[in-house]
Image (tube, rainbow, N blue to C red):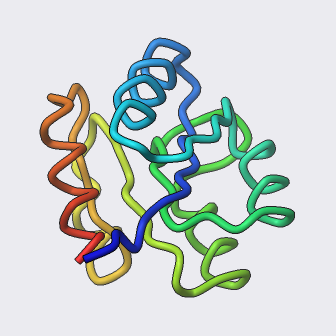
Amino acid sequence: MKNKINKILVVDDEQVVRELLESTLSSRGYLVTLSADAEDAHERISSERFDLILSDYNMPGGSGLQLIKSVKIINQKTKIILMSGGDIQKECAGVCRFVRKPFYIEDVLAAINKEDR
C-alpha cells in the first residue's frame, strides 16, 4: 500500500533538530522542507501543499497551535505532529499528535507511521 504521507514540513527554531529530522526523514524517502520559525512556516503552507507538518510548539513568531489553525484553514487533510518539552496533550486533543522533547527519533517515526494509516 502506498504511503499517504510524502511531503513533510519541519518547523523548529533549533537547527540541530531540523537537520536531524531532515536527514532521518529524507533517508526514508520523505520530501522534507525546513522552516526555522512560524512566520516562514505560514508563508510555506500558503504556497505549498504538505501531507504532514512536524512542528515545535514554542518558536519565534508564534506557537504551534497558531500554526495548526492556519493549516486547517488552508488544508484540513494536512496531518500535524507537535513537539514540545512541556505537557501540551490537552491542547493537541483531537487535533494533532504530540511528541515530547527531547525525543528519540523512533518516537517521531512512530507518530508519523500512525498518521500514515
Side (left or right) of 107 relative to 50: left
Is 102 drawn above or below residue 6 in the view shown? above
Q: Residue at x 22, y 25 (%)?
A: 102
Residue 37, position in %: x, y?
Answer: 69, 36
Total marks shown come to 0
Report x, y in % for residue 38: 70, 45
Look at the image and tell me in which quarter the N terminus lies. bottom left
Q: Is residue 48 above or below residue 94?
A: above
Q: Which residue is at the front of the view, 95 or 106?
A: 106
Q: Residue furthest front?
A: 1
Q: Hey, which quadrant is residue 72 in on the image?
A: bottom right
In the image, 59: left or right of 96?
right
Instruction: Report x, y in % for residue 65.
Output: 52, 63
| Relative side of 15 to 91, left or right | right
32 lies above or below 72: above
Residue 60 position within the rendered picture, expressed as x and y whole percent measured from the top left = 67, 33
| Front residue (pair 82, 54) | 54
**In the figure, 110 relative to 49: above or below?**
above
Residue drawn 43% across and 21% down? 17
Identify the residue at image location x=23%, y=47%: 99
| Quarter that holds the C terminus | bottom left
Q: Residue at x 48, y 29 (%)?
A: 22
Question: Residue 106 appears in which quarter of the rendering?
Answer: top left
